[in-house]
């Protein structure tokens, strides 16, 4: 999943289980949603951390955090609306944006019975919290959330797979 993001600059750290996690859903739509979120994080920060974990109730939680300027609390709901671009700090170097990335990602996550919430990262930046229902076996759907390596741990990627 993280293949190709190294060319956008910045550093992507992925932390999570060292095995595939399955979600029942449309792989193309989910890939686009996560692609939008990772690209946005790399546009506004030079370090991105992706933390993937499972919960006791068999959900998958994905946290995507950047060290950019963040989004003011008053804009967090509105940036999930189509064509809303937020405050000037996050839009300064991004005149080619139409304000669709976060709204598309949120719509895809919601359509897959998931949720997406925006929080402040510390000390600066944005932390996106995503929760999706976990499918326990592969069956006919491909793995869409896979992390490099065989064991849990941390890996710094400029390209790889999520």
Image: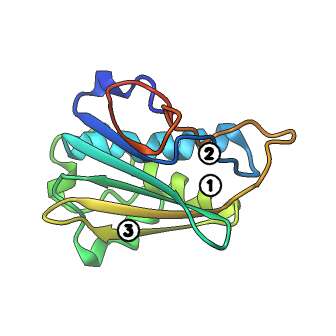
Query: Taking the image as drawn, is residue 100 in sight?
Result: no
Of marks 1 and 2, which one's residue comes earlier in the chain? Answer: 2
Q: What residue sits right under mark 1 in the picture? A: 108
Snapshot quadrant of residue 70: bottom left
Within 10 angstroms of label 2, few (less than 14), some, or many (20 or more) residues? some
Which residue is at 64% across, 47% downward?
21
Position of residue 13 measured from the top left corner of the image (x, y, whole percent): 32, 41
Which residue is at 26% across, 40% downward?
43
Q: What residue sits right under mark 2 in the picture? A: 30
In this orientation, which residue lies closer to the viewer: 156 or 142? 156
Snapshot quadrant of residue 134: bottom right
Determine the residue located farthest toward the front in the rendered image: 151
Residues under labels 1 and 2: Cα distance? 7 Å
Q: What residue sits right under mark 3 in the picture? A: 118
Which residue is at 19% across, 40% downward?
46
Of marks 3 and 1, which one's residue comes earlier in the chain? Answer: 1
Which residue is at 76% across, 54% downward?
136
* Total numbered labels placed on residues in the image: 3
Does the CB distance between marks 1 and 2 fall below 8 Å?
A: yes
Does the CB distance between marks 3 and 1 fall below 8 Å?
A: no
Query: Is 37 left or right of 147, judged from the image as shown?
Result: left
Element type at marker 1?
A: helix
In this orientation, which residue lies closer to the viewer: 149 or 14? 149
The answer to whether 22 is drawn above or below residue 148 in the figure is: below
In this orientation, which residue lies closer to the viewer: 111 or 27? 27
């Amino acid at each position: 999943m993280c293949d190709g993001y190294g060319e956008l600059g910045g550093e992507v750290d992925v932390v999570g289980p060292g095995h595939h996690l399955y979600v029942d859903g449309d792989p193309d739509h989910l890939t686009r949603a996560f692609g939008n979120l990772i690209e946005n994080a790399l546009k506004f920060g030079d370090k991105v951390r992706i933390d993937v974990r499972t919960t006791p109730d068999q959900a998958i939680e994905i946290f995507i955090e950047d060290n950019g300027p963040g989004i003011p609390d008053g804009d967090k709901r509105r940036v999930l609306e189509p064509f809303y671009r937020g405050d000037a700090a996050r839009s300064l170097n991004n005149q080619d944006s139409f304000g669709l990335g976060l709204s598309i990602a949120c719509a895809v996550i919601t359509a897959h019975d998931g949720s997406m919430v925006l929080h402040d990262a510390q000390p600066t930046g944005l932390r996106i919290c995503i929760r999706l229902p976990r499918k326990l076996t592969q069956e006919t759907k491909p793995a869409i959330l896979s992390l490099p390596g065989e064991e849990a741990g941390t890996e710094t990627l400029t390209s790889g797979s999520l």
